[in-house]
Amino acid sequence: MSAVLVRGEEWSKIPDDLYIPPDALEVILEEFAGPLDLLLYLIRRDNIDVLDIPIAEVTRQYMVYVEIMKAIKLELAADYLVMAAMLAEIKSRMLLPRPVSSPEEEADPRAELVRRLLEYERYQAACENLDKRVRVGRELFLPEIPMEARSLERPPPTVSLDDLLSALRVVLQREKAFAHHRIMREPLSVRERMTNVLEKVRSDGFTEFTRLFEAGEGKRGVVVTFLAILELVRESLIMLVQNEPFAPIHLKAAA
Amino acid sequence: MSDIRIRDIVQAALLVAGEPLTLERLGSLFADEAQPERAALLEALGEIRAACAEGPLELQCIDRAYRLQTRAEYAPWLNRLFAERPARYSRAVLETLAIIAYRQPTTRGEIEAIRGVAVSSEIIKTLLSREWIRQVGTKEVPGRPALYGTTRAFLEHFNLTSLGDLPPLSELRVVAVDQAGQGAGLGDQAISASGEATDTEATDTEATDTEATDTEGDRSEAAR
Amino acid sequence: MSDIRIRDIVQAALLVAGEPLTLERLGSLFADEAQPERAALLEALGEIRAACAEGPLELQCIDRAYRLQTRAEYAPWLNRLFAERPARYSRAVLETLAIIAYRQPTTRGEIEAIRGVAVSSEIIKTLLSREWIRQVGTKEVPGRPALYGTTRAFLEHFNLTSLGDLPPLSELRVVAVDQAGQGAGLGDQAISASGEATDTEATDTEATDTEATDTEGDRSEAAR
């Protein structure tokens, strides 16, 4: 924790005619990581034993800083005010005469504050250690060597047919819960052909019906294609057009 | 510290720069008073080149800038370093793919209706980029949804000559009923309950690991 | 090509990987039939470490993974290579990080209790976006606050082989019995109680937990 500096001079008392450039204000506030940090700073600056804090004096100094922060209209974190209240309370409790006849000795009002300061001090030290470590991008740099002849392969995912089918079984089981969906009546070869037909027909022009059939496929192929076309028409995915009876039939994707 | 040689500094810079370095840029590493001569830098580069002869790196000069790169001979090993691990598809992706296979041409809405759960665009994108499905058209209903079908690559991956090689649905249904029956006296409720359970699972996975690589999958699992 | 040594391949991989590599990952560079033994890989790493002694690099182990990095002595020159200054983090950010590192898994409330000041979401966001911390769970207390822990990226950035590499937290100073205090001496009981509360980790957490809610209460009161 470096001292609070304003224009290169350590700042412990506010001169009456204080002028603080706006930038310096933020520096001051940012310099302290919180009320405990400010208290520790005050304690260390005056070589005070944390275990025996002259609470009145420390409170006075703490308030000076808080007043500065207020005076320069910085939005003071509520925590600073909470601490101010705590200090004031400790101070007043310390002033109360302690009953001599008290059977149980009353705890030192400072005990909780001391505990927190000591605890915070440990982590402050840990923080300084961390900050001092050599770090990547500051003290350490990592080699970044390009690789010659790099090729990017994308291996296929590890999916087996069993995986696929067992996923479908789950769907089917679940589907029973959705009784209103009756799916997949047509043989798969028809569904596959539906996809193929859809790909062949275009939306911006007509495709001749007969061109969808391939002689090499035989009777079964013709039947499958025909069923596929019927199903596509039924699902309104394609339109059939015939200008007059016995004229050539044309197909068009419904778009 | 004083025994750090120009050559070591130049080498360090070439290793970490991530881009080729010109002589000017190399010179700028040094404080003004310690600025080496051009010749000294060139000498350092020469030494580095010579020292590299042993190892996996080589010094390249591209358009008057220098860089260290691995020798091409190392590509077979190094490619394995960057090889993507085979992805593992989530249940949601598999279900979607199965429904497209059996129900094609079909829309995302139809898949959602069957799965009873939303199908994220991630899932569709995953399957499209893997080229296992493709868009074969659009459906003439409001919103004009895309119609998807499976591809030749899909058939090839699963070693099928045609979709007809897939077991017919009726067979799967029987197995499904058998499996459901093992739960002893399952009424409608029980079935719908198990349906719900898988639903949640599906939505869970959808969010995170659509095409998670193994490690990513593990990580997100650990994070949960 | 046949005279490429394991060591050269490992070195090449370390130079191009851009992240620390585990022994498993190094092994995976080799085709199945040429997979070197673990011992051979460790030997290669040993040779690399020895060969580095001369140059600007050193071998470092981060969380059972290896990387090559420049020695800290080269920082003055290498910093001139990059126009961008290394990011500076405020003490609030670093303190928060240190507390998370030493107390993980921990909540924002616990950090606030130790620091005596609110931990802004900005701070947490900064640390999360640097991937130095991550949420590792939620604490089962009202409000279910997030539990944070540090990441592998944290170890990488701060050049730590493991969390155990961090110096131990300094001993909590023993609170001496002091009767000569201002006005009132510290009571024995109070001291031993507070001592116990912070002595062991387990009770430590409890102590700060209660405190956490305390401070939160205070703050909301102050806010009113």
Image: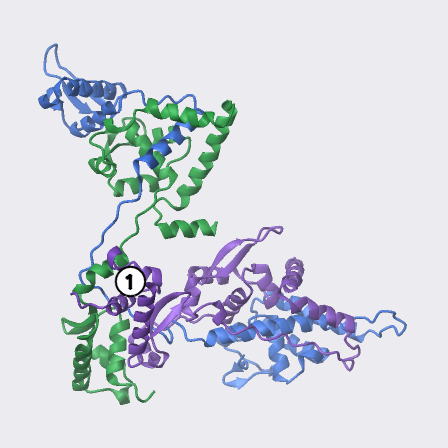
Chain colours: A blue, B green, C purple
Residue displayed at 68% across by 66% down: C197
Residue A133: image quadrant is bottom left
* Nearest the eye: C82 or B54: B54
* Quarter the N terminus of chain C occupies: bottom left
Residue A76 spot, x, y in % from top left: 59, 67
Question: How far across and how far down the image is residue B180, in percent?
Answer: 45, 27
Residue A22 seen in the current view: no
Question: Which residue does the image show at 82% across and 73% down from the upper left?
Answer: A96
Chain name for mark 1 = C
What residue is shown with label 1?
C36
**Residue at the extreme right:** A101
Quadrant of image for the C terminus of chain C:
bottom right
Left or right: C116 with respect to B143? Answer: right
- Residue drawn at x 41%, y 75% is A134
Q: Residue placed farthest to the top in the image?
A: A245
Q: Is residue B126 placed above or below B197 in the rendered structure?
A: below
Name the side, left or right, on which B7 lies relative to C138.
Answer: left
Three-letter amino acid code at the position of disc 1 = Pro
